Amino acid sequence: MSLRRPFQSDAVPPRSAFTLLGLAAEAEPIAAGLHVVATPIGNLKDISLRALGTLAAADAVLAEDTRVTRVLLAHYGITTPLIAYHEHNAAEMRPKVLEKIGEGRALAIVSDAGTPLVSDPGFKLVEAVLEAGFQVTTVPGASAVLAGLVVAGLPTDRFFFEGFLPPKSAARRERLSVLGPIPGTLVFFESPRRTAEMLADAAAVLGPRPAAVARELTKFFETVRRGTLPDLAAEFGDAPTPKGEIVVLIGPPAEEHAPVDDTDLDARLARHLARLSVKDAVAVTVQETGLPKRHVYARAVAVATKADGERT
């Protein structure tokens, strides 16, 4: 299998292959254009057969960090040339990419992890490729945004992805106050060293909303902490700085409260108690219903006691 130096040879490469479960598979040819390929966010097994075929069949792979992507390609026996494409060289590289696509080449673009264009510089390239009249194809797959959303235990019918908040507290609080009224779950990426400060600011601005902090999703040390913002802020404030990739999710603002009888209240509490402590379940339910905390707490204790009795 030949390995061509990217953008320096006009020779048509042979069909390529990839290795899966110790077996070599021949990749089907792909159309000229830009192929936006999602890659795993941590677990190398979280890649699709279509993504492997696309990466193997492409004339070159545009990578945010070639060192990171090289590990993935080597794991699956893919020898497609890698080209660095990131925020520091994007303006210089875009015309070269357009030129090669215009010559009939098929190029893939990946981020370090997950779906490209989400918190990385790929959007302007896609825009330029489309404006030039060339084809853009998506090869969907892993996404830290969706992975965090589905395990958070928060509403998923509406959500808003913000990415990274400003690093300074004053600007962060100002942005959180703007995002606060959005009627959906808020999703953030955060640096481990700023997670505790971010949660403290979120608690101060948004109050006792239900939230979750997901760390190292899909990896061996995956953890998800759930609770109210004040409780999570206290927990992370007292703990050592976490390691790994962090996704913070915050529930939507409470809606106007419809009347809730004790039957409905007990059902709500039972759902929350299945994943939260009594304290956190009460806080979330008070926010949802607007009922007095003392009454909700009494019902929560009764529901928890009944559930414990039924288990024994």
Image: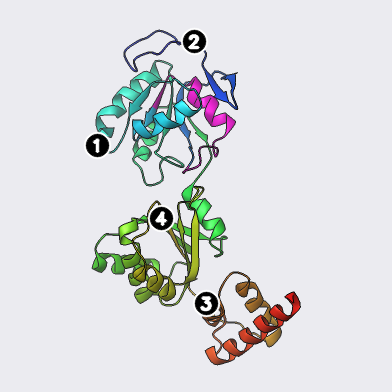
Nearer the viewer's eye, disc 3 or disc 1? Answer: 3
Q: Which amino acid, by three-letter code, is at mark 2?
A: Pro
Q: From the viewer's perspective, is the residue at label 2 or at label 3 nearer?
A: 3
Residue linked to disc 1: 88
Q: Alpha-carbon neighbours of circle 4 within 10 Å: few (<14), some, or many (≥20)? A: many
The region drawn magenta spans 41-61
Q: Which amino acid does the dot numbered 4 rest on?
A: Ile
Mark drawn on residue 14: 2
Q: Residue tagged by mark 4?
A: 246
* C-alpha separation, residue under disc 1 versus residue under disc 4: 24 Å
Instruction: Please say whether residue 80 is visible from this viewpoint.
Output: yes
How far separated are the C-alphas under marks 3 and 1? 44 Å
- Label 1 crowd (10 A; few <14 / some 14-19 / many >=20): few
Which one is earlier in the sequence, the residue at label 1 or at label 4? 1
- Work out whether mark 2 precedes mark 4 in sequence or the reverse, and give the earlier one: 2
Question: In the figure, 13 relative to 128: above or below?
Answer: above
Q: Amino acid at mark 1?
A: His
Does 41 sit left or right of 24 as displayed?
A: left
Q: Is residue 41 above or below residue 300?
A: above
Residue 308 falls left or right of residue 61: right
In the displayed structure, 25 sits above or below 292; it is above
Q: Of the residues under marks 1 and 2, which one precedes in the sequence?
A: 2
